[in-house]
């Protein structure tokens, strides 16, 4: 059995017909660019990063790291779409890794980060330590 690609017309009028492959080319999908859709805000002394990631297994598909003052969230996604009709069958899939990075305030470590996943939303909370007063050091000047 061979899979044969066939352009389906979106409209029945030949003048306005737009083949399916051209429609898909102009179908903007931000996830294909490697970005995760996210919102970032501060809640009192906590930095919150909420990422839209439906249909994943958070234990297997999510990696969260903190290194050199940067929080990095990487999500591996796989999606498969099948359409069965009496005149044909269509299957489409896509997969890949998407990531998002966030610069952290000074003195934040991996121990200050907690993550949870609920209803397709990955929420990462970073506890921000209280700011310390800058230390003032008095330097004595010697006669040379």
Image: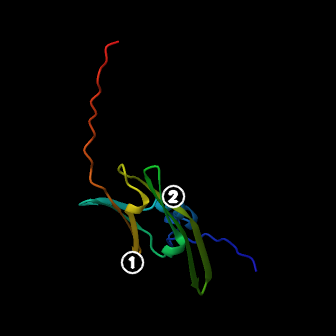
> Residue 30's spot in the image, x, y percent?
46, 60
> Residue 88's spot in the image, x, y percent?
62, 82
Snapshot quadrant of residue 134: top left
> In the rendered image, which residue does mark 2 sit on?
34
Q: Is residue 126 above or below residue 140?
A: below
Front disc: 2 or 1? 1
Residue 144 shown left or right of residue 95 in the figure: left
Most foreground residue, 138 or 24: 138
Q: Is residue 88 above or below residue 40?
A: below
Residue sitting farthest toward the top: 144
> Residue 80's spot in the image, x, y percent?
57, 75
> In the rendered image, which residue does mark 1 sit on?
119
Q: Residues within 10 Å of mark 1 (few under 14, many from 20)?
A: few
Snapshot quadrant of residue 91: bottom right
Q: Element under label 2?
A: loop
Whether residue 6 is visible to the viewer of this picture, yes or no, is yes
Q: Residue at x 35, y 12 (%)?
A: 144
Count the marks: 2
Q: Residue at x 45, y 61 (%)?
A: 36
């Amino acid at each position: 059995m061979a899979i044969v690609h066939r352009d389906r017309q979106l409209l029945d009028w030949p003048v306005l017909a737009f083949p399916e492959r051209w429609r898909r080319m102009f179908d903007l999908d931000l996830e294909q660019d490697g970005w995760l859709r996210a919102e970032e805000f501060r809640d009192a002394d906590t930095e919150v990063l909420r990422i839209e990631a439906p249909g994943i297994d958070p234990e297997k598909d999510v990696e969260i790291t903190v290194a050199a003052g940067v929080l990095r969230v990487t999500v591996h996604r796989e999606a498969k779409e099948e359409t069965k009709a009496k005149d044909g069958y269509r299957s489409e899939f896509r997969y890949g890794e998407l990531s998002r990075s966030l610069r952290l305030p000074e003195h934040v470590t991996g121990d200050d980060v907690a993550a949870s996943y609920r209803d397709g939303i990955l929420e990462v909370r970073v506890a921000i330590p209280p700011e310390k007063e800058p230390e003032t050091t008095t330097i004595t000047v010697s006669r040379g």
